[in-house]
Image: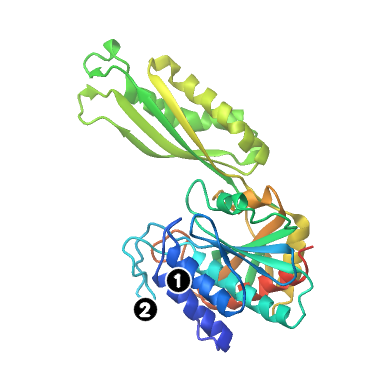
Amino acid sequence: MNGGATLCDDEQRLIELRRDIHAHPELGRDEFRTTQLVGDHLTDAGLQPRVLPAGTGLLCDVGPEPPEVALRADLDALPITDTKDVDYRSTVDGVAHACGHDVHTTVVLGAGLVLSGLASRGQLSHGVRLVFQPAEEVIPGGALDVIGAGGIEGIRRMYAVHCDPSADVGTVGLRSGPVTAASDLLEVRLSGPGGHTARPHLSADLIAALGALITDTPGLLARRADPRSGTTMVWGQVNAGTVANVIPRAGTLRGTLRTLSRETWNALPPLVDDVVRAVVAPYGVGVEISHVRGVPPVDNDPECIASLAAAAAAIPGGLVADTAQSLGGEDFGWYLDRVFGALARLGVRTPGSTTLYDLHQSSFDVDERCIGVGVALLTGVALTGGG
């Protein structure tokens, strides 16, 4: 959807590329076609992309060595069926770019091609690294693959954009400090002898224990964690039992833990373990806890936000806006644990549209004029040296 805008040739080529990626989505660490496609475009521009050791994702340096600034995109799609009625609809059953990673990839590639042209004319004073990361949507995420391959060594500043379907095209949403949350996965497995529901006193009532965990644990955790940290626990899956009159021998509860505070995130594993065991202790059941660390918060550096604001202000018709904190997870946080940087929200909604999209929704789509805005934003911030 281009909203009827008149597009220059370069923008139109990028839109065609985005549609190609959108039509051929790949899940985390299976992004072989996307990696090849991006690599071919970079090679055709005279650059030398390097595929990450696992075979998906790539790094590419532009301009003088060593690079000082990095621009990051994520390549992977989601296990969601694409329900849009468009000619670039996903051709892969049950897989779709429902979070805008096709846009992120196109924007970073477009910025890289602009910067490459400047470098060839001697107009790029410092090097820029393009990071095309696999597996943002899985745990552990592909940011750790990039870091493990030395992908951010020597980088001083790092930037990324994320599609925002609640903001109009031309809007760049910025926020200093935590903008997304840490996110972990929690699984609790309970066990007991099982028994007849007529004689619960002769068994261990595993269903009652699961119910206590579901209702009591989030509230207790909220009293044990700093309320200013935005810490929340939400259960998403419970499995136990097969018939009405039998107390089962096993049950499983799964959910997520989120917090905006890095300090609280560090303290959560022993705290959650203590709360869970305290809740189930009266029921006499066995308990096993699996706490999978996901991602830290994305904590935007104020100076990097100022650089993004300056770059956004230079875009004709661009609008800088405050953006809200989100309890969603984003593995760009792993980079910002090591490098100063910031993530901006890129408006992708057609102005005046009454159609409301959301991330991770089967009908998700964008106004493709956002691609030109994203390219201008990341090119501009890269040219400043990031700070």
Q: Nearer the viewer, residue 265 or 113?
A: 113
For residue 1, say whether it is visible.
Answer: no
Q: Is residue 242 left or right of residue 149?
A: left
Q: Residue furthest top?
A: 202
Task: Judge whether 32 appears above or below 267 on screen.
Answer: below
Residue 21 — which label? Answer: 1
Q: Is residue 154 left or right of residue 96?
A: right
Residue 223 position within the rendered picture, expressed as x and y whole percent measured from the top left: 59, 29
The quarter holding residue 90 reads: bottom left
Name the residue located 77 percent from the left edge and 66 percent from the top edge: 385
Q: Nearer the viewer, residue 363 or 311?
A: 311
Residue 62 quadrant: bottom right
Task: Check contact, mark 2 vs mark 1: CB within 8 A.
Answer: no
Q: What x and y, as percent, mark residue 172?
A: 65, 68
Q: CA distance from mark 2 to mark 1?
A: 13 Å
Q: Is residue 66 visible?
A: yes
Q: Position of residue 348 (x, y in %)?
A: 54, 70
Residue depicted at 60% across the width and 75% down the height? 110
| Mark 1: secondary structure | helix
Q: Quadrant of residue 174?
A: bottom right
The crowd level at tag 1 (other Cα within 10 Å; few <14, some 14-19, many 20+) is many
Type of residue at label 1? Ile
* Left/right of residue 237 with respect to residue 224 in the rendered view: left
At x 52% / y 71%, what residue is drawn? 38
Label 2 Cα neighbours within 10 Å, binned few <14 / some 14-19 / many ≥20: few
Q: Which residue is mark 2?
A: 87
**Is 387 located above or below residue 171 in the figure?**
above
Marking on residue 163: none
Q: Which residue is painted at 47% across and 28% down in the image?
A: 216
Name the residue nearer the viewer: 68 or 332. 68
- Element marked by disc 2: loop
